[in-house]
Image (cartoon, rainbow, N blue to C red):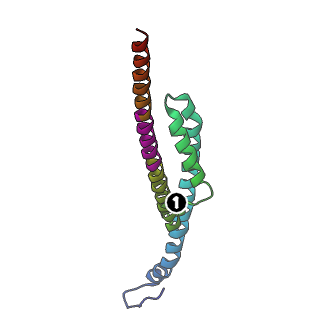
Amino acid sequence: MTGKISGSYGQSAIQQSMSGGAQAEEKKAGGKKFGNVLSKVASKTLDATASVAPFVPGGQLVGLAARGLSSLVKGRSGAEIATAPQDNLDKMWEMQEESQAFNMQYLQLQTQLQSDNRNFSTLSNLMKARHDTAKAAINNMHA
């Protein structure tokens, strides 16, 4: 870091301006330390939530969510978690597109099953009517 020295600056002012870069580096290191501490706290909190969740009514879903988040948090620093990498977003969009494709296939299957059910019901009703007509004709012959 460079600075101009004018007549009003003393030796202590020069030392303070020279140590400004070192302080900025200490702040960056402190930020990384804070991110790591925050990551550890989040991990422990999620682990505790996952272990307590089965004892709470309806807590199974919360426990599953906590376990999933805990697996995401482990192995990453706080800065990495906070910046949400683009590849995770791409994976999310890809999974959403796959989900939409599966939903469309499921909808087509439901439509086909409904059509088959209507055809079966129609044929069943026609065969029953034919059987009842034949039975009534046979009964009328005997009388």
Q: Residue at x 51, y 38 (%)?
A: 61
User: Which amino acid type corresponds to the residue marked 1 in the rendered image?
Assistant: Ile
Taking 36 as reference, is 140 above or below it?
Answer: above
In percent of width and height, residue 68 lies at 56, 48
Q: Which residues are magenta?
A: 108-122
Measuring from the top left, give residue 102's x and y in whole percent. 49, 53
Residue linked to disc 1: 81
Look at 46% across and 84% down and name the residue there: 14
Q: Is residue 112 left or right of residue 55?
A: left
Looking at the image, residue 100 lies above or below residue 31: above
Foreground pick, 93 / 84: 93
Q: Quadrant of residue 64?
A: top right
Q: Residue furthest top?
A: 143
Q: Is residue 46 above or below residue 138?
A: below
Q: Quadrant of the C terminus?
A: top left
Query: What residue sits 55% from the left and 28% below the top?
Result: 55
Magenta span contains residue 115: yes
Per the image, label 1 sits on a secondary structure element best described as helix
Q: Answer whether residue 110 is magenta in the image.
A: yes
Q: Hey, which quadrant is residue 17 in on the image?
A: bottom left
Which residue sits furthest right? 75
Q: Could you say which is closer to the camera, residue 50 or residue 133?
A: 133
Q: Nearer the viewer, residue 36 or 47?
A: 47
Q: How many marks?
A: 1
What x and y, as percent, mark residue 134?
43, 22
The residue under the point 61% across, 54% down is 74
Label the magenta part by its dominant secondary structure: helix
Residue 139 in percent (x, y) is at 42, 13
Classify mark 1: residues with Cα within 10 Å, few (<14), some (14-19) or many (20+).
some
